[in-house]
Amino acid sequence: MGPLQGIRIIEIVGIGPGPFAGMMLADMGAEVIAVDRAGPPSPLEMKLDINRRGKRSIALDLKSDEGRTALLKLCETADALFEGFRPGVMEKLGLGPDEALKANPKLVYGRMTGWGQTGPLAKTAGHDINYISLSGALHAMGPGNSAPSAPLNLVGDYGGGGMMLAFGLVCGILEARTSGKGQAIDVSMVEGSSALMSIFHSMLANGRWAPMRGVNLLDGGAHFYGTFVTKDGKYVSLGAIEPQFMQVFIEKTGLDASWMQKHLNPVEWAGLRQELTVIFKTRDQDEWCALLEGTDACFAPILPFWEAHKHPHNEARESFIEIDGLHQPAPAPRFSRTAPEVTAGPAKRGADTDALLADLGYDNEAITALRNAGKIG
């Protein structure tokens, strides 16, 4: 049931990368308790959220004494808690790291924000696009003859935020089991996305990255690393960086052998890209797949994410699962012995409130009183 079986983590429910981190941990076997609001749902809340799969939910009014007491009782039973509010919000509720660690000195307290807990921007609003702007990641994305392109919010929110949070929590839990002491973890999406840019700092230091966009090895400047339109208006990707892989592409497509002499010469890249643009429009996507897929040409069709589960490779590896009729990514990564498994679909708000409170020692009368007072949902 996953390598994190036996670990209990409290998720103070937010949006986006927080629930994603919780899903990652739940996928790996951790018991993740989503603490939802006792009041009406947020306008941003989705009726169906894959990131809520495999969790339990308790709905508490954290602005009330009763709600705070219940959460601190939960902290006593948990290995970690994480939240994604602006700095100071949890402290105003009386639920900051100091209070939580008093309840459980071994608790790991994860805090994820865009800018980090400190610094001149710490308490200002922002979104993924702003955080990857400050880290330098956004500047490197997009064609060189226009402003940087706004990508999906994967680099800041999910890579630099959610994944770093999940990684940090597991690191903190391992350390606490050795030291017997908990601690707070400050996850900044700016710093997380900066860490993801490490390879590009190295390339720049080695003289292998030019400051302008669209002329480099991995930003669309090279003809052998990019995307192309096919005859039927679909798209394919080519990533034949190494000469031996480009040689396969040349042989399969019947290109002149002189292409290899120009392969790693940046002066030739723009012209060769124009030629490849024309060449790729001579065949449909399926025809290119028949010619190149399964070879070392470093080729793949570009699929809409809602069709990715149909690809034979993804089917063979069972890379997607279906829960309640919804195709979704399977847990990743894979383990040879403690295989992760999704045991339930998205947790419904407050569905486990009574059971979790009963586990904490609340009797039926107390639970009913809390519900009638609007302190739980």
Image: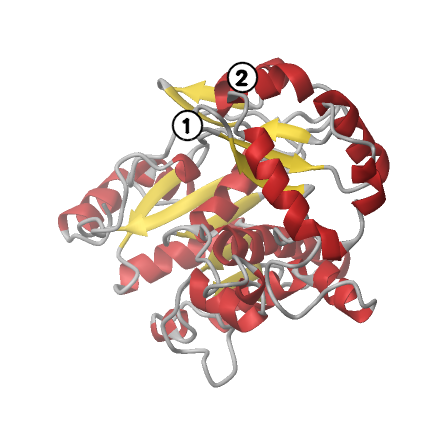
Identity of the amino acid at label 1?
Answer: Trp
Quarter of the image with the C terminus is top left
Mark 2: which secondary structure?
Answer: helix
Give coordinates of residue 91: x percent, y percent.
40, 74
Within-10-Å neighbours for mark 2: few <14, some 14–19, many 20+: some
Image height of 257 relative to 353, above or below: above
Mark 1: which secondary structure?
Answer: loop
Q: Which of the labelled discs sits on residue 306, or is there none?
A: 1
Q: Residue at the far left: name it.
A: 372
Q: Look at the numbered discs 1 and 2 and tell me whether their residues touch, using CB distance below 8 Å.
A: no
Image height of 244 relative to 286, above or below: below
Q: Which of the labelled discs sits on residue 186, or is there none?
A: none
Task: Looking at the picture, tell me which residue is in the foreground, 31 or 248.
Answer: 248
* Residue 184 at least partly seen: no
> Can you tell which of label 1 and label 2 is closer to the viewer?
2
Within-10-Å neighbours for mark 1: few <14, some 14–19, many 20+: few
The image quadrant of residue 360 is top left
Residue underneath mark 2: 286
Is residue 202 rendered to the left or right of residue 99? Answer: right
